[in-house]
Image (tube, coloured by chain):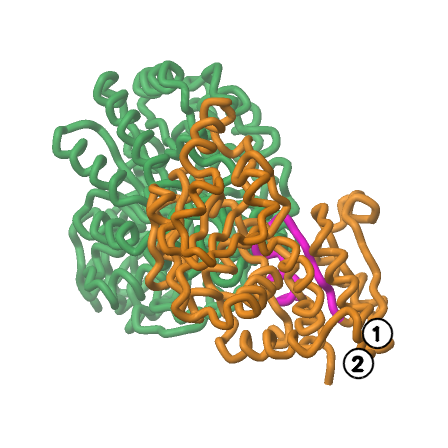
Chain colours: A orange, B green
Amino acid sequence: MIDSRSLLGIENLGRDEIASILNRASQFSLEKPQPILSGRRIVLLFYEPSTRTRVSFEMAAKALGATTYLVHATASSIEKGESLLDTGLTLHAMGAEAIVIRHPSSGAPAFLARHLDILIVNAGDGMHEHPSQALLDAFTIREAKGRIEGLKIAVIGDIFHSRVARSDVHLLSRFGAEIVMSGPPELVPDVAVTLAPGLKLTRDVDEAIAGADVVMLLRVQKERLGGLPIFVERYVAEYQMTPARLARAKPDALVMHPGPMVRGMELTDAVADSSRSLVLRQVRNGVPVRMAILARALAN
Amino acid sequence: MSSLLIRNGWVVDPASNFEAHADVLVREGLIAQLAPAGQIAGADEVFDARNLVVAPGFVDLHVHLREPGQSHKETIATGTAAAAAGGFTSLCCMPNTDPVNDLPAITRWMLQPERGAVVNVFPIAAATVASAGERLTDFAALRREGAVAVTDDGKPILHEGVMRDALSQASLVGIPVIQHAEDTALTKGAVMNQGPRAFRMGLRGMAAEAEWKLVRRDIQLARETGAHLHVAHISTAAAIAAVREARQRGIHVTGEATPHHFAMIDDDINDYDANFKMNPPLRSRQDRDAVIAGLLEGTIDAIATDHAPHALYEKRQEFDRAPFGIIGLETALGLAFRILHAERGMALPQVVRLLTTGPASVLANTAVGARGSLRVGSPADIAIFDPAARWKFDASKSKSKSRNTPFDGWELHGRVTATLVGGRWVFRD
């Protein structure tokens, strides 16, 4: 039986659970450490490079008084061919109480949770989910707009390869946002609308943006556009977020991006650096939201 | 050799359209007599088959016995023991061993008594050297050593010219080419069926088109060469439709389907458990229904298990890293009875046909063709099972060396009581 205090994804997390994490996050901040996890041992197990998620979880753990241990795939026995399960068993035997895991394989956190008697927090798995990002996105939207329900949110870019998109769509649609996805078929296949009830999909980005309260952009990697310069040019022409495009959204519309941004690809400098951009607010909110996630997992 | 009388059973032999309450006399390893119950006086040994079905031993066109080279997964001895427990008396084993079975010497090695097989083993040889898809193997020499078909299973023959040559050569020696139909150019990195479930799980999916496109091409080549194409583990509605149409046009195409493809769909994949990972993958509900329809109407000739054992440590990995394949010999009958017979109304003789004379006639020109029947004079390969049994499959009790199955704990219908190969008991429950 998987411990319900683990956080594996948004899909199977109830609305009340989500609301309680968000409410708890609003009581936390980096500036006001609360040592409720004093002496607790949290391992950050990272199989992929990461800046913001790793540092943010680390700061969150330390602000709660926990001790963190960072294990990187490239500087550990993992490079010598140790299996994920054996790595997990080893960390467990050493006394780790929770593992925050980032892994390139979808389902790796669920796999560990099923085979190990230890709390697991998913810090991003393959193309599957990135629940802490979705929670901080929801927290940021609530903070800026006062609500999620009834907002029109355009999600634009590489949804197929994005764990953030899957988690965001699960969460925001569950809280009553109207979600419109947009992007070329290779990045937003038709099947994307089956992810949650009531999703919309349009290939016309202007239609997706029209009247939007929030424009959420996702990273677009050149190599996923078929490898030819012409595809990149077409993406930029048809989907890149520019000030002119953004003018179609509501006057008080906000722009979000989970990072890392590819400037000149999914958005222009002018959009990235505009006063409407919530990008750094998202990063900042990552810490209290992850404090809430870790407190939920480990605090009695 | 002594004689054995199997008495009072419900004898079902689809090869001779026989179904009756009858006695079967076995002498010197052969079926000696079939008579209405009570008419055969006696024998050295008597087996009371009251309330049991007495059927020809099952024939599996598609198993991976892993020897030579991968004996940590399975051996010919353990794989055939699992077969006997599942009522199978003849196994056609795939050539993707290490080394690949592309030489007569390897085929011969598989058939040596030292391997410890308890049921009949019929090797299927590689169609191309090392299954690399380039140079054909020596079909005639392989056939002389006992190979009953050729295939590059798991590594589909994509090159059209090579496939055409393989079909022509196979036709000359009287065996089919078996194709694992998957255009691998379309399935790079894919680990399950393409569709809503794969999208939700964040896994790359195999499109149905990767199967049916190759099936269509191969059918065209079979038409042009007049050769016999056998489609392995067919799993999509469109591929089944293509086979149906080809057969109506008189093209020599046969097909097999696995129990897991008629018992489960992609939505059943449980929490990234790699015991639900196989190739072809669990498909959509529509595909599953098409597989059942194909079996019911006869477009698909045989149930084949694609028994593919893997060690625990190989399967207990991240879903996208674990190898494809599940074991299937001990669950095939129970799944066929539960899904096809109990839930879909397939008559008992047809279930038995799909496990016996159906597969045997796919390889009619070979030694397999003589199996799967209770006709007098046939080898006494017999499966005796309780059709009314309801039982829970316990993977930990499997006779296979491996445990990789999604059916652990499943309720199955119909349970094998005893199995005979050439008149010898090879399994008694």
Identified by mark 1, the residue type is Gly
User: Would residue A80 be counted in the magenta stretch?
Assistant: no
User: Would residue A111 be counted in the magenta stretch?
Assistant: yes
Any mark on residue B261, and which?
none
Residue at (43, 69) in percent of width and height? A174
**Left or right, residue A138 beside residue B223:** right
Residue at (26, 29) in percent of width and height? B216
Q: Which chain carries label 1?
A: A
Q: Please state the horizontal and vertical placement of residue B185, each as a whole percent of the image.
A: 44, 29
Indicate the secondary structure of the residue bearing disc 2.
Answer: loop
Indicate the secondary structure of the residue bearing disc 1.
Answer: loop
**Left or right, residue A48 beside residue B104:** right
Any mark on residue A65, and which?
1
Neighbourhood count class around disc 2 (C-alpha, 10 Å): few under 14, some 14–19, many 20 upward: some
- Image marks 2 and 1: residues in contact by CB distance under 8 Å: yes
Per the image, the residue denoted by label 2 is: A36
Count of numbered circles on the image: 2
Residue B207 seen: yes
Residue B197 seen: no
**Disc 2 and disc 1: Cα gap in Å?**
6 Å
Quadrant in the picture for the C terminus of chain A = bottom right
Q: Which chain carries label 2?
A: A
Residue at (62, 63) in percent of width and height? A132
Neighbourhood count class around disc 1 (C-alpha, 10 Å): few under 14, some 14–19, many 20 upward: some
Q: Please state the horizontal and vertical placement of residue A24, each as a whole percent of the image.
A: 64, 78
Q: Please state the horizontal and vertical placement of residue B65, each as a whole percent of the image.
A: 53, 43
Identified by mark 2, the residue type is Ile
Classify residue B139 by image quadrant.
top left
Q: Earlier in the sequence, mark 2 or mark 1?
A: 2
| Residues rendered magenta in the picture | A98-115
